[in-house]
Image (tube, rainbow, N blue to C red):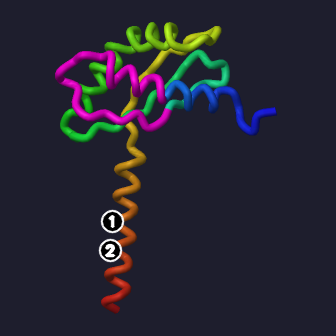
Amino acid sequence: MHPYKRSKRLGVLLREEVADIILHKIKDPRLGFITVTDVELSDDLRNAKVFVSVLKAEDRAETLQILNDAKGFVRGEIAKRLRIKIIPTFEFVFDESIERGFRIDELLKEIKKTSEEV
């Protein structure tokens, strides 16, 4: 018995494959540096939410639009690469957890600085 659900295991595999497809197959010069941080797959394996982070904050909206326009292509490539019964539909969303982590880190440094001053 596996220690975690099939949707989690398949999500990890999809994250690697989608990242490879974005890096090597999508030939759009407007795409900058993109990192696929996570894939959340529904329990029925039909819907996948792909979380991405973009290096330049001003390119977020355009990058998400390009990726969401190419989700049919990504789904076709996944169908070629993986032998699974159901190929999920993809939705690309911006991952805010990295920015949230930086903000928490800044707040903790600020708290430490003020506590040392007192």
Compared across the picture, whether 39 is left or right of 21 comes to: right
Q: Residue at 35% across / 50% down in the picture?
A: 99
Q: Residue at 36% across / 67% down in the picture?
A: 107
Query: In the rendered image, which quarter is residue 19 located in?
Result: top left
The percent position of residue 81, horizontal first and vertical second, equals 51, 13
Q: Is residue 60 above or below residue 108?
A: above
The percent position of residue 108, horizontal first and vertical second, equals 39, 70
Disc 2 crowd, CA 10 A, few/some/many (<14, 14-19, 20+): few
Q: Residue furthest right?
A: 1
Residue 110 image label:
2
Q: Is residue 34 magenta?
A: yes
| Magenta stretch in the rendered image | 16-38
Q: Which residue is mark 1?
A: 106
The percent position of residue 70, horizontal first and vertical second, equals 34, 13
Q: Are marks 2 and 1 in contact (CB under 8 Å)?
A: yes
Instruction: Give the CA distance from mark 2 to mark 1.
Output: 6 Å
Disc 1 crowd, CA 10 A, few/some/many (<14, 14-19, 20+): few
Q: Is residue 56 above or below residue 87?
A: below
Q: Residue furthest bottom?
A: 118
* Amino acid at dot 1: Glu
Residue 18 image label:
none
Q: Nearer the viewer, residue 76 or 100?
A: 76
Disc 2, SS? helix
